[in-house]
Amino acid sequence: MNLKMMRIIKLKLIIFFAATVAFSDALACDMCGCAMGGNYTGIYPQFTQNLIGITYQNRDFKHPFTSLNFNGESRVLSDNFDSYELWGRFYLSPRIQVLAFLPYRVHSRKESLRTTRISGIGDMAAMVNYTVFNTADTTRIKLKHSLLAGVGVKLPTGKYQQRDDSGSSLPAQFQVGNGAYALTGNLNYTLRYRNWGAQFDFNYRYNTINEWQYRFGNQVALNANVFYMWVQNSLVILPSMGISFEHYQKDEEYGVVKPETGGEIALLNAGADVYFKQFFARANIQKPIEQNLPFAQPNAGVRMNFSVGVSF
């Protein structure tokens, strides 16, 4: 690829993402998304290899000053969510891959009169992806692409009835689990020309009701990212950037819609992956660029993701 062609491709990518941001209206984060967020899973160039890794995620939220953001006489100030997740991707056949996720969550809440901290195993999840097509191994063409489609299930393995030191039951959104099954669907499309590429993800989650008659709203997440693969012998460095959009429907309790829930958020993504032989590491930051949420919902801060793992 000559210098002129490289400049044209870079300009087109910049224009595409600038237009995407400019035409994004109604963007936000919902309280139910606090513990359930983190839909962006990153980019993995080892398309046909098994993977196992550990991911750390951090999310923080600032609560507004409203009558709904009080726990008795104590004003709720902020929430912080840490997640340590063991995960793996395994190929049953060249076209079928299985992914499994086991999170351990640590949630802390600062109030004017107390600080509450809970922890425990979160909701486990599993997914099966089918490779609709993949031209990554084709040498006859320079423009390569792939499409995966998958379905999954989230299991109610996490605690969802924990209380603070005053004996008050903590909100459903703050629990390390939600006590209900969820069904998921996803599409993943990757386009690559030589060392440049783009990846697009679509994720949908359908939540069921738990025994407390609480049902989290269904969720939709869209991710679009561009990346560049710098290869030097066994070392691969893959910087990426892009945008994410998440939509949360309103929750229901005993069949009644909770008006203070639901919303949307848009985020800018920036990160880098490093691969050396069979080992890899990743750092990714997502910064909210606009939020649209009910008046009592907390504002989301910067999200951070770090992963290490091995392919085999």
Image (cartoon, helix red, strand yellow):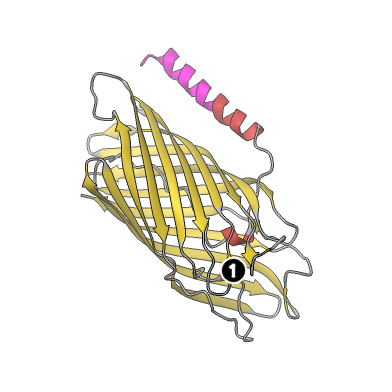
Asked whether 246 or 70 is in front, the reply is 246
Where residue 173 appears, as percent x and y from the top left, is 59, 67
As drawn, the residue found furthest toward the right would be 67
Residue at (61% x, 66% y) in the render: 79
Which segment is the magenta one?
1-14
Q: Taking 24 as reference, is 121 above or below it?
A: below
Where residue 307 appears, as percent x and y from the top left, is 38, 54
Q: Amino acid at mark 1?
A: Tyr
Where residue 225 appears, as percent x and y from the top left, is 47, 36
Tell me the quarter of the picture where residue 18 sits: top right
Asked whether 107 or 191 is in front, the reply is 191
- Going by the image, does 293 lie left or right of 242? right
Residue at (30% x, 48% y) in the render: 280
Where residue 207 appears, as percent x and y from the top left, is 52, 59
- Going by the image, does 268 lie left or right of 278? right
Q: Taking 243 as reference, is 288 above or below it?
A: below
Asked whether 235 or 153 is in front, the reply is 153
What predominant SS class does the magenta segment belong to? helix
- Going by the image, does 269 lie left or right of 124? right
Tell me the quarter of the picture where residue 167 sits: bottom right
Mark 1 crowdedness (10 Å alpha carbons): few <14, some 14-19, many ≥20: some
What residue did someone put label 1 on?
214
